[in-house]
Image (spheres, rainbow, N blue to C red):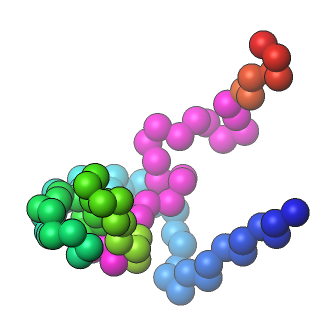
Amino acid sequence: MTPRPHRAHLPEERTESTVPLPPPELTEAECRRCGTYIAGLDGRYACGVCGWVNDHSEGHRRLPRADEDPDRPPKGRRRRRPRPGS
């Protein structure tokens, strides 16, 4: 059995915010592996030609937390898992 990864410690203070996040910015660059011209969101890229992906920490802005997702289901409500064999 593989142990669960521990959550990374975030130095920034977590405050509940009702301010909507700014929309992501479309950014463009060359793939570091094959040189293909690629586009991404906020400096996060994935090349469809060679499969190269940059690390999430290289982005221009922090990634939103789950509680900041406007499409997240209400608290206490989970998506049902399909029953095996159905």
Please report the residue visible at 23 percent of the width from the left and 75 percent of the height from the top: 32
Q: Is residue 33 above or below residue 65?
A: below
Residue at horizontal 42 percent and vertical 54 percent from the top: 18
Which residues, given as a range, are shown in magenta? 58-79
* Whole-percent x, y for residue 56 in the image: 41, 70
Indicate the position of residue 36 as horizontal and vertical percent values. 15, 63
In the image shown, does 74 or 37 lie closer to the viewer?
37
Give x and y (percent) for residue 51: 35, 59
Instruction: Give the prevailing secondary structure in the magenta stretch.
Output: loop
Residue 75, image x, y percentages: 66, 41
In the visual, does 42 lie left or right of 85? Answer: left
Image mark count: 0
Q: What quarter of the picture does the C terminus occupy?
A: top right
- The residue located at (47%, 53%) in the rendering is 68
Q: Quadrant of the N terminus?
A: bottom right
Left or right: residue 79 versus residue 35 is: right
Query: Is residue 59 one of those drawn in magenta?
Result: yes
Among the 4 quarters of the image, the one containing residue 8: bottom right
Q: Is residue 62 visible?
A: no
State left or right for residue 80 relative to residue 27: right
Residue at horizontal 26%, vertical 55%? 49
- Residue most toward the right? 1
Asked if 56 appears above or below 68 in the picture, the reply is: below
Q: Is residue 71 visible?
A: yes
Instruction: Give the quadrant of residue 14.
Output: bottom right
